[in-house]
Image (spheres, helix red, strand yellow):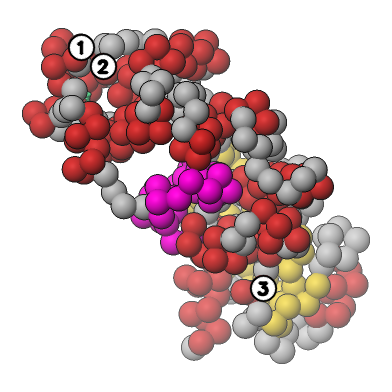
Amino acid sequence: MLYRWYDANCRILPWRETRDPYCIWVSEIILQQTRVAQGLTYYMRFINRFPNLMSLAQAEESEVLLYWQGLGYYSRARNMHRAARQLVQTGGTMPADWAGLRQMPGVGDYTAGAIASFAYNMPYPALDGNVYRVLARLYDCDEVFDTSAGKRFFHTLAEQLLDRQHPRQFNSAIMELGALQCVPAQPDCDVCPVVSFCKAHQTGTEALLPVRKPRTALQDRFFTYTIYICDGQTLLYQRTKRDIWQHLWEFPLVESQGWNEQKWEGVNYKEYEHVLSHRRLHARFIIREVPSLDIELEKLKDSYPQLQKVRLDGFGEFAMSRLTERAIDEWLFTLIER
Ligand code: SF4
């Protein structure tokens, strides 16, 4: 029933049309925190530019980040690049077993299982958020799934359920069921191919499952960016600390514990709130038109790595966070065009 449903309903996606472990790896990393519709565009661009391990390994990290710009969670791109370089040094091919895949930087149990089953049809489960939800509902299981113990529990369950003759088909089908039918709110149980096996549907607990651990409070951070402007140019530096957005470019930033009572009349500024997985950023972008960027560069260069002058129409060459991109696209460019 499940396979028949999958054949009739699955979405046609390029990474499903290939057995190339490299392409499947790229798709899985992109889709970890990204919806399919958005991920598809990024995947096509990425694969066109970096069609194989060698092309990815030979690229500069700054270019890889540029192709990742807007997807967030940039450590994923950095890890992929690092993994590609390591693999090229040790033979130039993707590992063909689960343990080898699992050792690649940025590859966890889920991604190793996905590549092993989709590329090589090996009998490993692949548990993403969709699969956790389907399993929790099929077994009416209120085990918290996003803890180490919960993950082990569901992994064992998935191993027991796995169709070892057809792991590729099984993993694809159960993931797609979670993505299209057994959705978080209002699952479409009336036409579900596994409704007769579904314990949560029998007890009416679908909406309560799966159970996740309580969310931790978001950490507030306060960023003030200064956009120095002179003669159609500004200053950008590259973040180097082990923190969010490592290696991305942005305007000189001062972080504070909160907003002070400074008066803002006459200052050209714009505020944004930007939420990441564990943080809420309160960002203020201030424009300062200055007589000479060289003077500012000299004053600031010891505090900001790689600080350099950049043309206002040259941002496209620098990988930036979504927050900085927003400030540029939604605000700075509208001011410049006036
Ligand atoms: S019957 Fe409903 S809750 Fe159960 S697996 Fe199908 S869609 Fe999900």
Q: Is residue 23 magenta?
A: yes
Q: CA distance from mark 3 to mark 2?
A: 48 Å
Q: CA distance from mark 3 to mark 1?
A: 53 Å
Q: Position of residue 331 (x, y in %)?
A: 50, 72
Labels 3, 2: front one: 2
Judging by the rendered image, the residue that carries numbered circle 1 is 199
The answer to the question of whether label 1 and label 2 lie on touching residues, with beta carbons closer than 8 A, is yes
Mark 3 nearby-residue class (10 Å; few <14, some 14–19, many ≥20): few
Q: Main secondary structure of the magenta part?
A: helix
Judging by the rendered image, the residue that carries numbered circle 2 is 138
Badge 1 residue CB within 8 Å of ligand 1: no
Mark 2 nearby-residue class (10 Å; few <14, some 14–19, many ≥20): many
The answer to whether residue 129 is visible is no
The quadrant in which residue 229 appears is: bottom right
The residue type indicated by label 1 comes to Lys
Q: Position of residue 185 (x, y in %)?
A: 23, 32
Label 1 residue SS? helix
The residue type indicated by label 2 comes to Leu
Q: Residue at x 69, y 61 (%)?
A: 55
Q: CA distance from mark 1 to mark 2?
A: 5 Å
